[in-house]
Image (tube, rainbow, N blue to C red):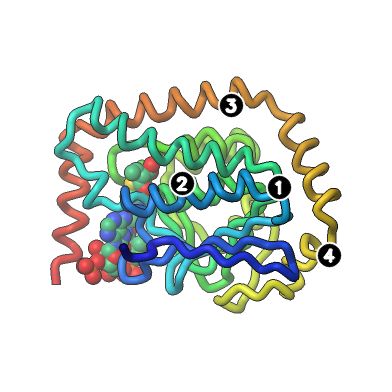
Amino acid sequence: MSNDVLLNLDQNNQTAVVTLNRPDKRNAISLKLIEQLDQIIDQLHRDEQTKLVIITGSSPAFCAGGDLNDFHGDIGQEEAHHLLKKMQQVLWKITTLPIPTIAWMNGLARGGGMELASACDFRFVNEMSNYGFTQGQLAISTGWGGGTLLYERIHPQEAYYWLVTADVRSAEQLKEIGFAQGIFSSEQLELNHPLIEPYTNRSYEQLKHWKDQWLKAQDLQRLKKRMDEEVEACSHMWVGQEHKDAVANFFKRNEK
Ligand SMILES: CC[C@H](C(=O)O)C(=O)SCCNC(=O)CCNC(=O)[C@H](O)C(C)(C)COP(=O)(O)OP(=O)(O)OC[C@H]1O[C@@H](n2cnc3c(N)ncnc32)[C@H](O)[C@@H]1OP(=O)(O)O
């Protein structure tokens, strides 16, 4: 079975690097990738040595969102809900990992790729890349709970505006609105990077404690309910003709 997700456990830094590994498909999230990512996140929930989790992508992209071959228009609402729910559950597990999580956004991200980043506690972006919650351009809304999480990461008014405009933005713009905590220039991730060192320089106890405080500062029950409502809403938009046309146009655009 191809490894669509790679896990590297760096013992020295007690850091887990999770890499989406479908570069030829811009790390689009297929059902198979979801399964592999789910198993890795479950493993990290059980791991009491790892103090930091970093999610990144095999260049040139970070993540192009849901794989439109798997998440395509001609399925019914219940099936759409069932498929969307799978990744929502993974995003929930990432959100509630008991140690800090970082999205190292090495390359472009679209749609669900931004939702994946929103499930992480911190986000660092590549100055050369661009990023967008582009679901609105596909006649749907976010469908994995990442739109709900966005409201927790930046000012709610800014989150609302971005979801409606569905536009693609620069690294600078993401830093400006507080979605990204920092900007880097090198594509590949180094654990001794100045943006990563503040985490690897801290102990497991410190990082676990701060994450516990962070989770307790939120109404997790209400957050999960809102994420569930998001999946339901998207599953209804999914079956609309506009969405089907938008997906068909994407693949037409990409026909060589
Ligand atoms: C499931 C819902 C979920 C949610 O919001 O909850 C979603 O994420 S919906 C999907 C949202 N994502 C997109 O709409 C992005 C679509 N892709 C693009 O706009 C571009 O591919 C881009 C900007 C990511 C990269 O452009 P670039 O020019 O660098 O590459 P290509 O377009 O030539 O693509 C290379 C290769 O990758 C395949 N690809 C890219 N994105 C997807 C995708 N989302 N699903 C499936 N496949 C994707 C593309 O078809 C090309 O494959 P090839 O076989 O070489 O033609």
Q: Is residue 123 above or below residue 76?
A: below
Cα distance in 3D space between marks 3 and 1: 19 Å
- Name the residue tied to disc 2: 38
The x and y percentages for residue 185 are 61, 76
* Along the viewing direction, whichever of 144 and 167 lies nearer the viewer: 144
Q: Amino acid at mark 1?
A: Ile
Q: Is residue 93 above or below residue 29?
A: above
- Name the residue tied to disc 3: 223
Indicate which disc, 4 or 2, sits on the residue closer to the N terminus. Answer: 2
Q: Amino acid at mark 4?
A: Asn
Which of label 3 and label 1 is nearer to you?
A: 1
Cα distance in 3D space between marks 4 and 1: 14 Å
Residue 53: quadrant of the picture: bottom right
Left or right of 172? Residue 32 is left
Within-10-Å neighbours for mark 1: few <14, some 14–19, many 20+:
many
Quarter holding the N terminus?
A: bottom left
Indicate which disc, 3 or 4, sits on the residue closer to the N terminus. Answer: 4
Quarter holding the C terminus?
A: bottom left
Q: How many marks?
A: 4
Can you tell which mark lies on residue 12?
none
Cα distance in 3D space between marks 3 and 4: 31 Å
Secondary-structure class at tag 3: helix
**Cβ–Cβ under 8 Å for marks 2 and 3:** no
- Dividing the image into four equal quarters, which quarter contains ligand 1? bottom left
Q: Amino acid at mark 3?
A: Leu
Q: Is residue 70 at least partly visible in the picture? A: yes
- Name the residue tied to disc 4: 201
- Name the residue tied to disc 1: 99
Within-10-Å neighbours for mark 2: few <14, some 14–19, many 20+:
many
